Image (cartoon, helix red, strand yellow):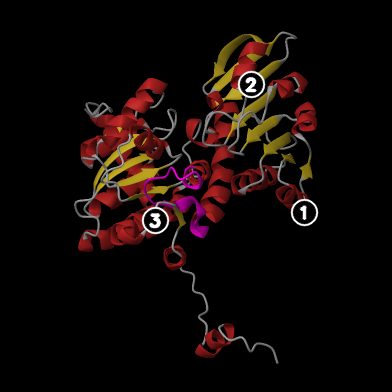
Amino acid sequence: MIAHNIKDIDLAKKGKLRIEWAAQEMPVLKSIAERFKREKPLKGCRISACLHVTTETAVLMETLKAGGAETFLCASNPLSTQDDVASSLVRFSKIPVFAIKGEDRKTYYKHIANTLSINPQITMDDGADLVSTLHKDKRIEGVLGGTEETTTGVIRLRAMAEKGLLRYPIIAVNDAYTKYLFDNRYGTGQSSIDGILRATNRLIAGSNFIVSGYGWCGKGIAMRAKGMGARVIVTEVNPVRALEATMDGFEVLPIREASRIGDIFVTATGDINVISGECFSLMKDGAILCNAGHFDVEISIDALEKMAKSKRVIRDSVVEYTLRNNKKIYLLAEGRLINLSAAEGHPSGVMDMSFANQALCVEYIIKNYKRLEKKVYSVPERIDKEIARLKLKAMGINIDVLTREQTDYLHSWEMGT
């Protein structure tokens, strides 16, 4: 029933050591796990989780189990699973995992179905595939609520809520300050560059580095590319974000113009066909394309396939497309998440806060589901601030506290002299 092969004890042991390494940089989640172990606030709760199966996710799963939950896990992307981690979770933590790196589309959805076989009370999503599957199959009975990890998933869920289709409450973990200001910006920034380097071993300094989308993920990627010496060019459709990119010192161009000069292209928009067939025809010989968004729809791969007279795998995670004019274009990681498909994903230090939000929001739902409506909620402010407080404490950083006089002043309408 469990998808991952657990016969390879050496693979499981390797995963266990890597999970321990990640846990060292996740002190907030560790403190939550210690409390969960004492109090068992999730006792008897059935949780279906669709997340990237990484070392950091493993620490979260073990935290939920410490709280008393029964948890099934599947992958939220076919290429993001770390097989040694999946094997370790199954063998040593006794947590069922339905995920194999490189699984095809049919297997991916079969694993989602397996993960939902426990008739969950809580869903934990990264991209909203669990929620959408439950709604399509009309299997909502017994679900108390859910959480959503990423921007793309929140967009999908808010669209469902606006149309009156969402049948249970969801907390948008992605919208917590302690998530998007750090995970999206610093995590995506560092890990996307890491994925590009592992896949290509190309020099970033001196390159024309195109970032499509200047949300928090795009900001992080642009920041890190600039720090490595690239000439960063941003493409945007939102005038406010385009203005922000300009004020941050980046050149802003339409994608058509950027296509002519770019050496490396990274999409981070959450939308489809950001880089289209027209763009491919304008690109320089040797252009490198990759995606940092959740789904593999931002680069028009179908158009690239039709325009190419041949293709070949030239390195791990690199496919070379030769167009009819003999120009070569390189696609990384099949157009899927570059940071998880070609590298290891976000550093543990930022996932510590993101997954702390997940754990505490599950606890919040269990305690408050009776008064929650069928809509998408933000993470409660007290949870967000508590995670920030715990992170600062773990880093040995102290901050000031308002005096009673200062607090009273801020709550008074009689401000000024």
Indicate which disc residue 247 carries. Answer: 1
Of mark 3 and mark 1, the one earlier in the sequence is: 1
- Whether residue 172 is in magenta: the answer is yes
Indicate which disc residue 330 carries. Answer: 2
Q: Are marks 3 and 1 in contact (CB under 8 Å)?
A: no
Q: Amino acid at mark 1?
A: Met
Which stretch appears magenta? 160-178
In percent of width and height, residue 265 lies at: 67, 32
Inter-mark Cα distance, 2 to 3: 47 Å
Above or below for 394 versus 326: below
Give the residue at x 70% y 49%: 241
Above or below for 266 versus 366: above
Of mark 2 and mark 1, the one earlier in the sequence is: 1
Depth order, front residue of 24/114 = 114
Give the residue at x 64% y 34%: 266
Q: Amino acid at mark 2?
A: Tyr
Residue at disc 1, secondary structure: helix
- Whether residue 337 is in magenta: the answer is no
Residue at which label 3 appears: 373
Instruction: Locate residue 264 relative to residue 369 in the image: left or right.
Output: right
In percent of width and height, residue 253 lies at: 79, 38
Instruction: Locate residue 139 relative to residue 311 in the image: left or right.
Output: left
